[in-house]
Amino acid sequence: MTELLEVIRQRSSVRLFKETPIEENSMKLILEAALRAPTAGGAEAWFFAVVESYDMRKRLHQLLLDAHRVYFTRLLTKAWTEEKFESWVSGSGGEYYFAPLYVVVFADLRERIYNDHSIEEFWAHQSCAAAVENMLLAACDLGIGSCWYGVPLLLEAELKKLLGVDDSDLRLSAVVGFGYPRSETKPRLKRKGMEAVMKKL
Ligand SMILES: Cc1cc2nc3c(=O)[nH]c(=O)nc-3n(C[C@H](O)[C@H](O)[C@H](O)COP(=O)(O)O)c2cc1C
């Protein structure tokens, strides 16, 4: 098996991080991996906000918790009670999702290259998703844990306000947290079987 396939096998989401900062060089390698992703029409219609300062990370962390509250207690068809959510958060000492580094990924639609704006937006988000996956794999290769957060989309306006991003053509695509895992991580290899999700023709 190649090293890349091994990294793909080993990666899993990490939600509890050590406080150890991510070295500048590792951060650069992760961001370079993002920029190497395939991008629809070669448009590179993405924009990355790199959040490192303690103050901003604290505020972003609070927003992540708020967004997860909405997700668990309101969005899920089998919604959690507020009490269940509180006990889940306090189970981690309130530290779930607090990361030494966040990258907030926006679909950047400020320069249009297609007549159909909805397909343009869809492709921009798909390109962002490819960039996110590249970052997760690069991080894993460097021994750095990560988690892809889609739930902040539920509080997009609040997040943009927090980051001082007010252009309506920058659309939130994902938030990613990076850090060294607090404990040993094991890949969640259990997935639906190939026969359940594939068809050979
Ligand atoms: C589009 C997308 C959005 C996600 N959003 C969240 C999120 O907001 N919070 C979270 O804890 N995990 C989130 N995840 C991580 C998934 O829960 C995780 O990938 C899944 O449970 C499989 O586990 P693994 O990544 O360890 O293989 C997201 C993953 C994707 C692809």
Image: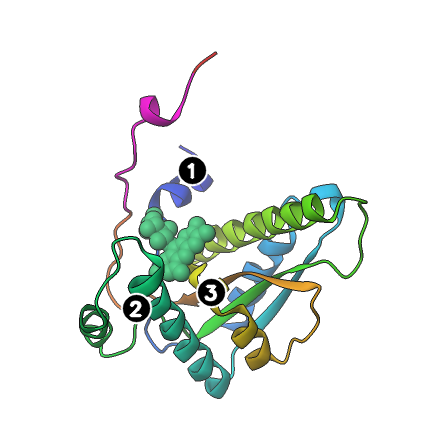
Of mark 1 and mark 3, the one earlier in the sequence is 1
Q: Quadrant of the N terminus?
A: top left
**Residue type at the position of mark 2:** Leu
**Residue type at the position of mark 1:** Leu
Numbered label attached to residue 5? 1
Q: Nearer the viewer, mark 2 or mark 1?
A: 2
Q: Is 30 on the left or on the right of 92, as rendered?
A: right
Residue, x 25% and y 54% (percent of image)?
78
The extreme bottom residue here reads: 55
Residue wearing tag 3: 154
- Label 2 to label 1: alpha-carbon separation: 25 Å
**191 magenta-colored:** yes
Residue wearing tag 2: 16
Residue, x 18% and y 68% (percent of image)?
84
Residue, x 29% and y 28% (percent of image)?
193
Numbered label attached to residue 192? none
Q: Which residues are magenta?
A: 188-199
Q: Nearer the viewer, residue 163 or 103?
A: 163
Q: Callout 1 environment at 10 Å: few (<14), some (14 to 19), or many (20+)?
A: few
x, y percent for residue 175: 49, 64
Of mark 3 and mark 2, the one earlier in the sequence is 2
x, y percent for residue 151: 43, 62
- Label 1 to label 3: alpha-carbon separation: 33 Å
Residue 128 lies, with reference to residue 81, above or below; the image says: above
Answer whether residue 122 is visible to the viewer in this image.
yes
